[in-house]
Image (spheres, rainbow, N blue to C red):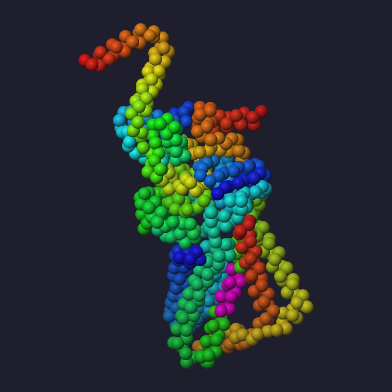
Amino acid sequence: MSAFKGLLKKDFGISKFWFLFWLIFLLTLLIIPLGMEIYFHMPLSFLPMAVILLLGGHVFFLPAMLLSLLHLEGKTQLWLYNPQTSKVLFLSKITVSFVYQVISQVLLTGVGLTIYQFYKNQFFIEVSTLFKGILVLNAGLLLIALYMSCWALFYWTIYHSLGKFPAVKNWRWLVVLILFFVLNTISTLIAKVEFIKEIVNKWTIPVLMNTNFNYKQGGWEINLNAAEIPLAGIIVYVITAFCLFLISCWLLDRKVEV
Amino acid sequence: MTVQLSNVTKRYGRDFSLKNVSLSFEKGKIYGLLGPNGSGKSTTLKMIAGLVYPSSGKVEVDTEEVSRQTCKKVAYLTELDMFYPSFTVGKMIDFYASQFEDFNSKKAGQLLLDMKLDRNKKIKQLSKGNRGRLKLVLALSRESPVLLLDEPFSGLDPMVRDSIVKSLLSYINFEEQTVIIATHEIDEIEPLLDEAIVIFHGDIIGQKNVETLREEEGLSVLEWLKSAMAERERIENE
Amino acid sequence: MAKDFQSSKPIYIQIADHLSSQIVRGEMRAGEKLPSVREMAIQSGVNPNTIQRTYSEMERMGIVETRRGQGTFVTENEQVLKDLKSRLQTDIIHSFVQNMKDLGYSQEEMITGLEQYLRREQE
């Protein structure tokens, strides 16, 4: 068994019950609105909304799962007693969380499509458009979740790097919080600069994204609009994520101690 | 393989865990790192394993400064609970085997038999003694040039201790390994040691060959340790 | 066994003494193979380097001999074994006499005391 496979197996092993609980939780959150629909005789009211909300909530799923995995290891940090590089250690956890998220999203998308099958004649969407929309939505969710995960990694390693300084040990969370606000303020300020705005909006790629739902006279009207996504913005996000990941690896290697 | 600490200091804020410690360990010997709790034994071992970095000074294993990758060469038994409770004994062994190239699964199998550990048992169902045994299985199954044992007897009853001493003697590769055992329980391991090092408040206050100590001063390690510590406390109080 | 060592004497000598008395008592015969260093280490809970030293010391005294690739054996030299036995006897007598002297007995008293003891034991 290769080292990475061994790590994956271990990380799946320690988290599989969490994922199982998540699926049960998810199911409960779908059954309740379904029950309400039946009770209030309002077909296609609560359930699709629940599906959409849950799917949207997935941007937080990967970072949350990742943080749970890290929290477990962080109790002793003895997972660092391992000859694999910190990149590999992190990647294993990200991979496992990513796979969980894909499964969870596929499940919800499946539920959504099933609902759609029942009420097909009330919608007017072309199959190819629907397909593209689903794909873009899911891919987008995964990418945003990955981006958020890099931030989660970054703050987690900062928090644990501070552990060896007794002076701040009990106030680590505050330091992380302040850092969070400072970094957010800086990025907001940068985004306001006209010159940068111009560059960012210079090249864009159209993506089917904006979905409008309207409930009209017992039926749904859905519009899928093409949204313009700035290319430079994406590049900035990718580079940011990459840098955050590398900084986290460096911190884990050099500054986090057992 | 030699392990070398040169003027190593480890500070946590204003507190010192180690103060300007220089030590050298060579192949083929068993060292006892002895001292009361909180004297800096664990920190020293963690530094050799690359899990803690010195505030100043240098720690080298085989002339290379330690990093996280050093654990390739260093087998380390921690005093902490290191397991994933939901894992079975077998899964834990397999995980170690996948991570460390020098892990000898055959040896692990033999050790499990010797220690009467059941592969299929969940770790959370193991008694404290059996968890201690499992830690030892994981450390001794590695054919690493350096073996570090942090409090291998802590919390174990005398019967288990005897069996652990026997396993150490059976499975340590005396010609090839550098072995360092940190403990405050000296009775059990004295006959195992070549050299005894006393550490106290982050300071090395003595290093002696165990047999020379008996030959020249007529003292057991425990007697020597007590007198060395009393001497140090007297000096500190003056 | 680990805790049975006296603190004032090197462990390798204590093990050598133990083996010597085993040989004299006939628990180990002339020409018999001794356990390997590692086996002996495990049996007695002692560092193999110490056992190695025990064996070297006994070899120097001629009590055991190491045959290349075969192991360590009790010597078959009768004279050496006889000397060993008388040496142990001397050791025991020495400590007996020392103890008696400490208690304040004279030479004659020691001898009569010993004779009386042996007579009583025979009956």
From this viewpoint, is residue B189 visible? Answer: no
**Viewer-proximal residue among B164 and A230:** B164
Furthest residue toward left: C123
- As drawn, is B57 to the left or to the right of B222? right
Residue B234, magenta (yes or no) = no
Image coordinates for residue B176, horizontal then vertical, percent: 49, 48
| A229 vs B30, nearest the viewer | B30
Q: Quick one: quadrant of the N terminus of chain C?
A: top left
Residue A230 image-quadrant placement = bottom right
Say if B14 sits above or below A53 in the image: above
- Judge by depth and name the residue closer to the eye, A198 or B57: B57
Residue appearing at x 44%, y 32% in the figure? C60
Question: Can residue A137 be seen in the rendering of this structure?
Answer: yes
Residue A137: x and y, percent? 56, 81
A202 sits left or right of B71 in the view:
right
Q: How many dots with numbers?
A: 0
Q: Is residue A2 above or below residue B200?
A: below
The residue positioned 66% from the left and 71% from the top of the image is A240
Look at the picture and state if B65 lies above or below B203: below
Quadrant location, the C terminus of chain C: top left
Write the start and end of the magenta stretch as one range: A139-149
Q: Position of residue A68 (x, y in %)?
A: 53, 63
Q: Residue at x 57, y 62 (%)?
A: A85
Tell me which corner region of the image, top left, top right, bottom left or bottom right, holds residue B201: top right
A106 shown above or below B228: below
Q: Main secondary structure of the magenta part?
A: helix
